[in-house]
């Protein structure tokens, strides 16, 4: 996953699904499998859309924009949903972080 956020030094943090976490499209969204534990998560179409946007390297605010364009949802509610989805996936230890060169809001160098 490539969710970016500024770290303490102003650099962008890139989040990816950690090694051993497989993602597959399903009829009803996305399934994630942690091969090391055998645990799996199913994401409904809305959560799957958020994950896809973030995996494409877009920031969370872009995921909010995509949700509000596609669904009849208030921007504040969409923002809460995006943060909740990312938080739940992070809590499940499905991400690994890697530093990216560049400053927040700037061009990577």
Image: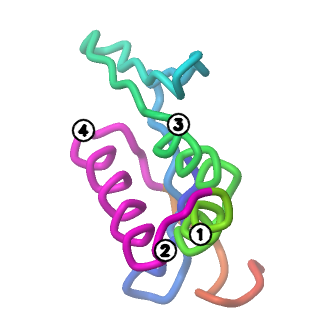
Mark 4–mark 3 Cα distance, whole angstroms, equals 19 Å
Mark 1–mark 4 Cα distance, whole angstroms, equals 20 Å
Residue 73 in magenta?
Answer: yes
- Residue, disc 1: 59
In primary-sequence order, the first of circles 1 and 2 is 2
Dot 1: few (<14), some (14–19), or many (≥20) neighbours within 10 Å?
some
In primary-sequence order, the first of circles 4 and 3 is 3
| Image position, residue 66 (x, y; %) | 65, 63
The magenta-colored residue range is 71-97
- Residue, disc 2: 5
Mark 1–mark 2 Cα distance, whole angstroms, equals 7 Å
In primary-sequence order, the first of circles 3 and 1 is 3
Mark 2–mark 4 Cα distance, whole angstroms, equals 19 Å
- Residue, disc 4: 92
- Looking at the rendering, in which quadrant would you find the C terminus? bottom right
Q: Residue at x 46, y 22 (%)?
A: 31
The picture quadrant where one finds residue 34 is top left
Q: Are marks 1 and 2 in contact (CB under 8 Å)?
A: yes
């Amino acid at each position: 996953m490539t969710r970016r956020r500024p770290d303490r030094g102003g650099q962008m943090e890139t989040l990816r699904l950690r090694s051993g976490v497989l993602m597959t499209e399903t009829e009803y969204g996305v399934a994630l499998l942690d091969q090391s534990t055998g645990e799996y998560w199913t994401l409904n179409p809305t959560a799957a859309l958020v994950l896809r946007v973030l995996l494409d390297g877009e920031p969370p605010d872009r995921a909010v924009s995509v949700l509000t364009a596609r669904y009849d949802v208030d921007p504040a509610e969409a923002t809460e949903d995006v943060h909740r989805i990312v938080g739940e996936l992070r809590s499940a230890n499905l991400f690994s972080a890697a530093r990216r060169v560049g400053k927040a809001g700037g061009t990577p160098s």
